[in-house]
Image (cartoon, rainbow, N blue to C red):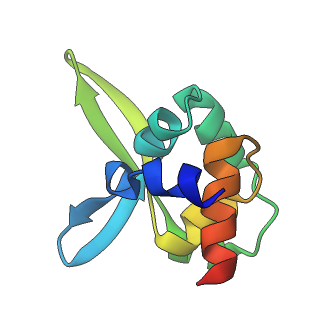
Amino acid sequence: MNHQLANLDFRDMVVVSGDRVITTSRKVAAYFDKQHHHIIQKIEKLDCSDEFLTSNFSRVTYEHKGNQYVEYEISKDGAMYIIMSFTGKKAAAIKEAFIKA
C-alpha cells in the first residue's frame, strides 16, 4: 500500500482560497473519477450536525461557458468525512495515511 500512496499526488485536490487551504467538490470528483453531481448529492445528504456542515462545506457557484453551476468549497475535515465513504485504491490510500498521521 505504501507504493500506491507514494504515487498519489494530493496536491491535485488542494486550492488556496484567501488564507485557507481547501478543496472543492469538483476537485474531489475529478480526483476520485466520480461524477460531480454525485459528490454534490452526497454532500447535500450528509447525516452530520448543522455545525459540522456549515463549518466544513460552503456552497458557491462558478461559471462555465456562460452558465452558473453549484460546487462546494470543502475544508480538510469535510473532505475526510466524504472520502471516508469512498471505496477504491485512492480512497484506501488516503484513509490509511490519515490513520497513520
Where residue 27 sits in the image (x, y, percent)?
41, 43
Residue 71 quadrant = top left
Q: Residue furthest front?
A: 3
Q: Is residue 61 left or right of residue 8?
A: left
Q: Examine the rendered structure and indicate whether residue 19 appears above or below residue 95.
A: below
In the image shown, does 89 or 12 lie closer to the viewer? 89
Tell me which residue sits at (17%, 71%) in the image. Answer: 18
Q: Quadrant of the C terminus?
A: bottom right
Where residue 29 sits in the image (x, y, percent)?
52, 36
Q: Examine the rendered structure and indicate whether residue 15 appears above or below residue 97.
A: above
Tell me which residue sits at (77%, 53%) in the image. Answer: 85
Q: Examine the rendered structure and indicate whether residue 5 appears above or below residue 19.
A: above
In the image shown, does 95 or 72 lie closer to the viewer? 95
Where residue 61 sits in the image (x, y, percent)?
34, 41
Q: Quadrant of the N terminus?
A: bottom right
Q: Judge whether residue 86 can be spotted in this image.
A: yes
Tell me which residue sits at (56%, 62%) in the image. Answer: 79
